[in-house]
Image (spheres, rainbow, N blue to C red):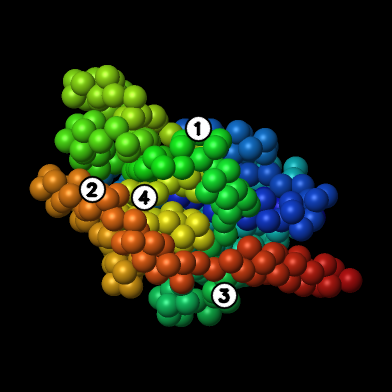
Amino acid sequence: MRVLMTGGGSAGHINPALAIAETIKRNSPGAVIEFVGVKGGKEEDLVKREGYRLHFVESAGIRRSLSPANLRSIYLAVTSPSSNKTRAILDEFQPDLVIGTGGYASWPILVAAAKRKIPTAVHESNAIPGLTVKMLSRYVDEIWVNFSSTAELLAKSKKSRVIAVGNPTREAYGALTRKAAREQFAIPDDRLFLLSFGGSLGAENLNDAVLQMMKDYTAEHPEVLHVHACGKRDFETCQKRFRELGLSAFDNCILVDYLYDMPARMTAADLVISRAGAMTLSELSLLHKAAILVPSPYVADNHQFKNANLLYGAGAAELVEEKELSSGELTEKAAKLLSNKEARRKMEDAVAAFADPDANKKIWERVVALTTRKANEKR
C-alpha cells in the first residue's frame, strides 16, 4: 500500500495526518507513506522529525482580511494542481490513496489525484469545515469528519460521501500511565503539574496572560510546576518578557518554544491550559484531563469557541474567552482548580465522555475500503 498524506501550515493540520499515518503503519507494516506540504510550514519540522519523506507543492492560504496576497493565493489555487511540480509527485510516487487533513497545503495534490481517479479522502477535525475542505468536497471520494453534525454543513456535496470517524490520535496518547509519565520528567507524585500552550506558531495574548500568571501565582507556589510552550514564532518575545518579570529565578516556572513530547507531558499534567482546537480536545478527552480552554477568536466561524462551549456546558472544562484574559480570570480559575482535587476529578470524569477510542479503527476501515474498491475496479 502506497499512501500520500497531505496537510500543513500548523500543527493542527499536521498532527492528525501523522496520527493517520501511524494507524496505517500499525495495521499494514509494509505500507509506504510519504507527505506533501509547503515550504516554511510546520510540516518541515514535524514530518521530517518522524522520518517521513516530505514533498513540496506551491500553495498559500487566503486571508480573511482584504489583502493583495490573496491574489497570489487564488492564482496558486487555480494553477498548482496542474503544475509540473504537483504532477511529478504523483508520477514518481504512484499512490494507491491520497489523504488530506485540511489547510491550504492539501489542496493541490488532492485535486490533482482526484482528477487522475486516484482514491482520495480528506479529514476534517473541527465542527465547522474549513474553506479548503469545503472546496475539496467537490473532488474527493470521501470526507471523514469528527462531528456528525459537520455532515449537514457538507450536504450540498453530491459526489463525496461524508463519514463520521472521530479524530485520529497518536499511539503515544495513552501509552503511559500518569505515574510513568511523571517519573519520566522526575515530577514527584505530590507535586502539582500545570501544562499550558497556545499552539505551534504562538498566541500572543494567551502567552502574555500565562506569563503574568507565572508572576502572580506560580512564582508564589513552589508546589506547582508550570511548563508553558509559547510557540516558535513568539519565543524570543516571550523569553524577553519572562526575564523582565524575574521568572528565571524560579525553577518551577519553565518556558519553552514547542513540546515534542506532548503526549507524555499531557499525561503527567494535573491541569492543562490550551486553545480549543478539535485535535487538542480529542487528546484531552482521551487522557481524561481537566482543562481551562481559551478558544482562539481568529479562526473561521469562531469554531474553537463552539468546541470549548460544548465541553464547558457539560462540566468537562473551564472556559475563558481571549477578551477576558487581561482581567486575571485565567489565573483565578487555574488557582481554584489546582487547589481543589475533587473539582478536577469531576472534570476528568466529564471530559472522558467525549473520547472516541475507536476513531483510529474507523479510519483504518475507510482506508481499506477505498483501496480495495480501487483494486477491484482495475480487475
Contact? badges 2 and 1 (CB < 8 Å): no
Q: Which residue is mark 1?
A: 186
**Disc nearer the start of the sequence (4/2):** 4
Q: Which residue is mark 2?
A: 335
Measured as percent of width and height from the top left, residue 280 is found at 43, 54
Q: Which residue is mark 4?
A: 271
Between 230 and 110, the one nearer to me in the picture: 230
Q: Residue at x 25, y 39 (%)?
A: 210
Contact? badges 4 and 2 (CB < 8 Å): no
* Residue depth check, mark 1 versus mark 4: number of the one nearer the observer: 1
Q: Amino acid at mark 4?
A: Leu
> 10 Å neighbourhood of mark 4: few (<14), some, or many (≥20)?
many
- Viewport quadrant of the N terminus: bottom right
**Disc nearer the start of the sequence (2/3):** 3
CA distance separating discs 4 and 2? 10 Å
Q: Is residue 37 in view?
A: no
Q: Residue at x 23, y 31 (%)?
A: 219
Q: Amino acid at mark 3?
A: Ile
Q: Amino acid at mark 1?
A: Ala
Q: Quadrant of residue 36?
A: top right
